[in-house]
Amino acid sequence: MPREIEFFSLLVPGLLPILVACAVLFVAVDLALARLGLYRFVWHPGLFRVALFAALFSGASLLLRQ
């Protein structure tokens, strides 16, 4: 996989598509967790959301960028 991707004659980092996909996945998971009310059991919901996105993005980038 190339390190840069050409997008309308602009070079963007290769992790940008993974970042966008993880952001969409994070919004879906965040809405599901909020609707189920699981954030009541978390000590700091904002910190949990940041850690959830970091785990999703790092896991996906490790799986897809070998």
Image (tube, rainbow, N blue to C red):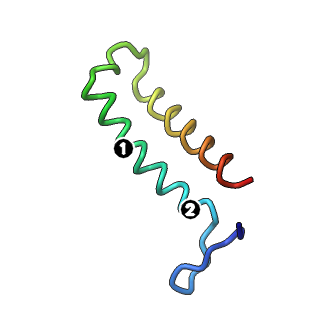
- Tell which of 18 and 45 is nearer to you: 18
- In which quadrant will I find the N terminus? bottom right
Q: Secondary structure at mark 1?
A: helix
- Tell which of 43 and 6 is nearer to you: 6
Work out whether 20 lies above or below 52: below
- Residue depicted at x 51% and y 84%: 8
- As drawn, the residue found furthest toward the left would be 35
Q: Secondary structure at mark 2?
A: helix
The kind of residue tagged 1 is: Val
Q: Which residue is mark 2?
A: 16
Q: Which residue is mark 1?
A: 27
- Residue depicted at x 54% and y 40%: 56
- Residue depicted at x 43% and y 20%: 44
Estimate how packed mark 2 is, as few (under 14), some (14 to 19) or many (20 or more) residues with alpha carbons within 10 Å: few
Q: Position of residue 5 (x, y in %)?
A: 62, 74
Q: Position of residue 6 (x, y in %)?
A: 60, 79
- Tell which of 6 and 1 is nearer to you: 1
